[in-house]
Each structure stands twice: as structure tokens, then as C-alpha cells.
Image (tube, helix red, strand yellow):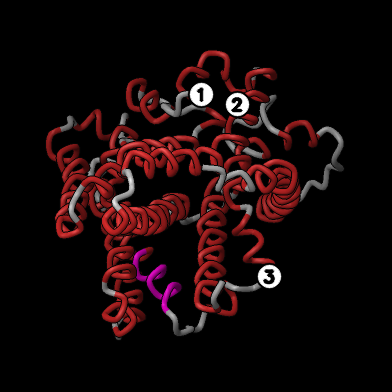
Amino acid sequence: MTGKKELYFNQLNGIRFIAVMLVLLDHWLIPINPFSFLGHLGVVIFFVLSGFLITRILFENADDCGKNHSSPTAKIIRFIYRRSLRIFPIYFLLMFIGLVLGLSNMRNLWPYLFFYLPNIYIMLKGTWLGIWDHLWSLAVEEQYYLVFPYFILLLSPKRYPWLFIAMLFIGIGTRLGFSLYASHDMKENNWMWWYVNPFSAVDCFGLGGVLAYLYHYKQTYFQSIKFLKLGLLISVLLFVGVLNLAKMSEFPHDNVWSIVFERFSGAIVALFFIALCIRTDTWELSSFLQGKVISYLGKISYGLYLYHNIVMNYYHDQGNTIWYYLTSHLPDFHLELVNFTAYKFLICLSLLIGISSLSWFLVEKPINKYKNRI
């Protein structure tokens, strides 16, 4: 592995760590967290990052098909096999544990969870899923993995830019259509319809695809771009502006800023952030993103995200989480809200890192050795 690729992968692990920490801060610090958008931004970063990584891998496969007349079908099967090997083992392990213990209504929800359809359940029922809420984003990614490879491997490379433009229009258009045509009551009470809809996340994957296209096919141009840091600064300011406009709106959910523009502006932030991290040159955050601790936490970020609601869930703790069972054995400190919440956060974070580390070394890492079998 070259030094360039080592730098590249290390920094992406740092991005994974940042994304998962944004989710944890949002989900675990609800009583004292004034920034309710953190979890959404973390998920959007994951979407854009997945769009970049998956599209770049598929470009390599498509190039091989073109040069060596390899079978696109074989490439798709191999892609799905490798993705499944990475995602399924600990996902279904957690599903089995939840089913055996009957956690958070699992025995009624299991058909949706086992077939990666929790987002569809949320859309149909207009309700969340207790400690399984966060699995909607994994479902969206899996639905993307099952469909997107066909477009890359069957389309001519000349049509790739049009594909990504179409993805931007589909994602933004889905949310805009909901904003324009859904009733006020639906937008306020069933706003999750646009939030978990797989089509409404397509623009995030598309932006990741644009970045992969520039990195893979326009490398010289990509490395020469001078405005990435300025673009990151402007996109952050734009994102903050959109958040403020949404906050000043008459209704918390029935406003175009939160429905249409919050996700897209957050994806632009992710786009510039990832672009800076995959450049051959270094920047101010490089040493932080490549630090051993940060890189390791990024490596186990899938487990951190998957297990975090099992460790602690603010709205559904009782009888469902590890924190609930620990509280009877912990001393009662009678701390004020801020100190107690921070204390609880640190305990749960330690537990989560421990569980995710065991998951990585005992399950994920050993199974990953089989990813090149086909």
C-alpha cells in the first residue's frame, strides 16, 4: 500500500469517528443539547462518504469490465457479497439478541428489521421504533447498495455525470414534492416520511458520486482545485444559515428550510470535508484525523453506531438498554442535570467502545478475511 492510500484511508476513519460522535452527542445528550441537528448531520456525512467509497469501487469494477470484458453480473455479485459480509454478521447478531430478549417490541417489528425495511415501517406507520430507530439509515444504505451498482456497471462512463445530476434532482425533488404537496398535518405529524424515504437521500449519495468521479477520472483537476477550504467554510456558513431560517419558521417541521435544504446543505459540508481529506496534500486536521485513537474509533464506527441505542436510549431506556440494568448497581450521585448527563454519557461511551471493540475483534475482523473469496 502506498503512502498516498494510507493517508487517504486513515483520514476517512477520522471522518467516520466524527460522524458517529455527532450522532452520539445528539442521541445521548438530549436534555442539555441545544443543537438538535447534530445527529442528522452525522448521518448525512455517512451517506456522502458511502456514496464516495462505493462509487469509487464500482468505477474500478466498471473499468475492468471495459478493458478486460469481465462480466458485470459477476462484479455485482462480488460487490453485494463483500458488502453483505461487512454489514450483515453483527446486524443479524443484534437482531437475534433483540428477538430472544424481546427488546423494544422486536417480536412485532422483526419482519421489517430482518429485511432491512424499518424506514418503510416508519413511513407507513408514522412512528419510530424505540431502540431500533437508528436502523432506518442502515436500511437506506442497504437499499442503495442493492440498486446503484447496476447503473455504474451497465451505463457508459460518458453518462456518469448525467446519472449524478439525476440523483441530485431525485433527492431534492422528493423532499421538495413533500414540502409542496403534503398537507400541513402530515408535514408536522408525519414529517419522518421525507426524512427516512430512500429517495430523499439520493442526492447525498449523488454528491459522494460526484466526488468519486472527480477523484477517479479527473485526478489531475481534482488535485489542482484551490478553493476546497474556502468551499468548506462557505458551506458551513450556508448550513448554519439554513438551520437558523428553519428555527425562525412558524412551524418546526412544515418549512422548506428543514425539509428541502437542511439535508442538502449538510451534504455540501460533507462533500468539501471529505474532498480535503482525500487530497494528496495535508491540511490542518490531518494529524487529528490520522491519530491512532481516532483512526481506531473510526474503524469500529459501524459497531458504535449499530449498538449505541442498545447501550442507552433517552426515550426508551426502561427494560431495553444496558444503562437501565446498570443503574440499580450504580451509586446515586444526586448531581445536577448537566453533570449527571455528562457522567452518564462517559459511562455509556466506555461501554459502547468496549462492546464495539469485542464485536470488531471477535466477529467483524475475522469475517472480513473472507471478503476476497469470490
In the rendered structure, find residue 114 and report the number of the disc placed on it: 1
Residue under label 3, please give it: 292
Look at label 1 and name its amino acid.
Phe
Position of residue 299 measured from the top left corner of the image (x, y, whole percent): 61, 57
Q: Which of marks 3 and 1 precedes in the sequence? A: 1
Position of residue 150 measured from the top left corner of the image (x, y, whole percent): 28, 42
Q: Residues within 10 Å of mark 2 (few under 14, many from 20)?
A: some
Q: Which of marks 1 and 2 precedes in the sequence? A: 2
Residue 219 is left or right of residue 366, and the answer is left
Q: Are marks 2 and 1 in contact (CB under 8 Å)?
A: yes
Quarter-of-image position of residue 287: bottom right
Residue 267 is left or right of residue 324, and the answer is left
Judging depth in this view, the residue of 234 and 77 nearest the camera is 77
Q: Is residue 70 above or below residue 242?
A: above
Chain part drawn in magenta: 271-279
In the rendered structure, find residue 95 and report the number of the disc placed on it: 2
Residue occupying the point 24% across, 28% down: 185
Residue occupying the point 45% across, 73% down: 277
Residue 59 is left or right of residue 373, and the answer is left
* Residue placed furthest toward the front: 68
Q: Is residue 276 magenta?
A: yes
Rounded to the nearest whole Å, what is the CA distance between mark 2 and mark 3?
Answer: 31 Å
